[in-house]
Amino acid sequence: MELTGEQRKKFREALIAAFPDNNLEIMLKDKCGKNLYDITSESKNNIDKVFDLIEHAESQGKLKELLGAAQSYNPGNPQLREFKNNYLNSLTQDEIENIKFVLKEIDFSIL
């Protein structure tokens, strides 16, 4: 899952809206078994933490897993839902089927 600059910005905004304060740390630990502060600094603000998390997930090829974890932790968040829908609309049918398969089969502990 490769993001354009605009998609990365929208994903960042959606994660910030869905996980204010330290909720991002809790989601990452609960859904992925990862410590946010192994990826970013505790002293950074929430925007910078989310930026670092997306960069890390992208470098590891785990953006789909991050999106899946965020959605399963906060399924009612309208910004996450909007990002997912807009992102899916930009993909080919094969790419959509691959994401659906990955989201069903995610082992969140590997993020």
Image (cartoon, helix red, strand yellow):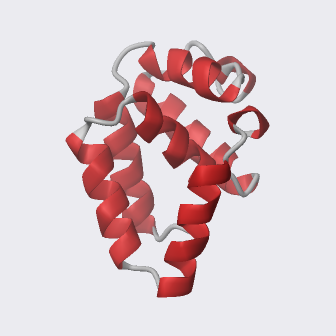
Q: Which of 5 and 28 is in front in this view?
A: 28
Quadrant of the image occupied by residue 19: top left
In the picture, measured across the screen, residue 69 lies left or right of residue 106, that is left
Asked if residue 107 lies left or right of residue 5, the reply is: right
Residue drawn at x 45%, y 35% is 72
**Quarter of the figure that contains the N terminus:** bottom right
Q: How far from the left and from the top, in percent, is residue 25?
A: 54, 18
Counting every numbered tag in the picture gives 0
Q: Can residue 10 be seen in this view?
A: yes
Looking at the figure, which quarter contains the C terminus?
A: top right
Q: Position of residue 47 (x, y in %)?
A: 41, 32
On the image, the x and y values in percent for residue 85 come to: 31, 63
Q: Above or below — where is 30 with respect to 12? A: above
* Residue at image coords 45%, 58%: 8
Q: Residue at (21%, 43%) from the top-left corner? A: 78
Q: Position of residue 35 (x, y in %)?
A: 70, 19
Residue shown at 68% from the left, 36% from the top: 108
Instruction: Return the residue nearer the eye: 47 or 22.
Output: 22
Check the image and report above or below for 98 versus 109.
below
Residue in the foreground of this view, choosing between 41 and 19 = 19
**Is residue 63 at least partly visible in the picture?**
no
Q: In the depicted view, which residue is nearer to us: 68 or 20?
A: 68
Left or right, residue 11 beside residue 25: left
Q: In this view, does 47 lie to the left or right of 100?
A: left
